[in-house]
Amino acid sequence: MTTIYDLHCHSTASDGVLSPTEVVARAIEKGVNVLALTDHDTTAGITEARLAAQQTDLTLISGVEISTTWENRAIHIVGLGFNETSATMTALLTHQAELRYQRAVEIGEKLAKVGVTEAFKQAKMLASGEVTRAHYARLLVNMGKVANENQAFKKYLSQGKSCYVKAQWCDIPTAIEVIHQAGGLAVLAHPLRYTLTNKWVKKLIADFTQWGGDAIEVASCGQTPEQRLLLAQWAKHFGLLSSVGSDFHFPCAWVELGKSLFLPDDSLPVWTKLSLD
């Protein structure tokens, strides 16, 4: 029987819509055997998820998705299999939370200028944890300002739009170092989703490798076969492990826990270096 891994997903601890308990239940329902909950810049949901996974056949490993800045772009680094009580990890995530809070407040102020009053207060009501752009997008949908969350980003929240606020995250070397100090592996999340040319993606992967990164996400939902093979080739070229992750945020047809998360045959899976006890 094939083991199904999903090493990138989100809960209400960040910008997902299901609680950690609900994420675990859905993962089991979808046949996932090994899961990492990787909320944005927080490990707040892991304890609940671990409790939910007890007395089940699901193996849960610690995870987080750290926001970083590279070449004036936001790049996400997933940490896997680390000690959540690590002092350096706790310090970094505390600082990231402060940056995220300030950014959320500033976005709310900009939304007020386009007629969305008390936006931060209203977005906070949609969030179990920190307020993110995704919560503002849901607020704009609920208010009828846009038809869906994608429109919210395109009209208000994306770079260059009226309510965009540039993030001030840590750099990639810092994220990798902290993950390693906590005993984990550093994974470059969804390399083809940063609207970069292939030349720039390769530069990103080269820098990530030079700074000590361990793996890249090779398999994700909604990929073409060509994209998966290309990422597998780059992982092999740079001597990196290969990871898999749905980047699940909410139930939908095209992004689902455990969906189509297989690696090409010659890939070296990241879980060969993870403790799955």
Image (tube, helix red, strand yellow):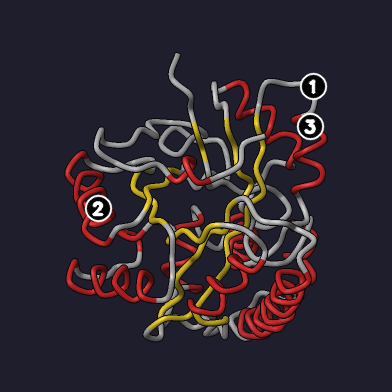
Question: What is the three-letter code of the residue carrying label 1?
Answer: Gln
Q: Residues within 10 Å of mark 1 (few under 14, many from 20)?
A: few
Q: In the picture shown, does residue 74 fall above or below 241?
A: below
Residue nearer the viewer, 58 or 266: 266
Secondary-structure class at tag 2: helix
In screen coordinates, is 79 left or right of 84? left
Residue nearer the viewer, 176 or 103: 176
**Mark 1 lies on residue:** 55
Q: Viewer-nearest of labels 3 and 2?
A: 2
Q: Quadrant of the image for the N terminus?
A: top left
Q: Earlier in the sequence, mark 3 or mark 2?
A: 3
Res. 52 mark: 3
Question: In percent of the image, x 24 and y 38: which residue is there?
Answer: 266
Question: In percent of the image, x 43 and y 79: which residue is there?
Answer: 159
Secondary-structure class at tag 3: helix
Secondary-structure class at tag 1: loop
Q: Quadrant of the image for the C terminus?
A: top right
Q: In the picture shown, does residue 255 fall above or below 236?
A: above
Q: Viewer-nearest of labels 2 and 1?
A: 2
Q: Is any atom of residue 119 visible in this view?
A: no
Residue 21: % across, % down = 76, 36
Q: Residues within 10 Å of mark 3 (few under 14, many from 20)?
A: some
Q: Viewer-nearest of labels 3 and 1?
A: 1
Q: Earlier in the sequence, mark 2 or mark 1?
A: 1
**Mark 2 lies on residue:** 236
Q: Residues within 10 Å of mark 2 (few under 14, many from 20)?
A: some
C-alpha gap between disc 2 and disc 1: 37 Å
Residue 203: % across, % down = 25, 75
C-alpha gap between disc 3 and disc 1: 8 Å
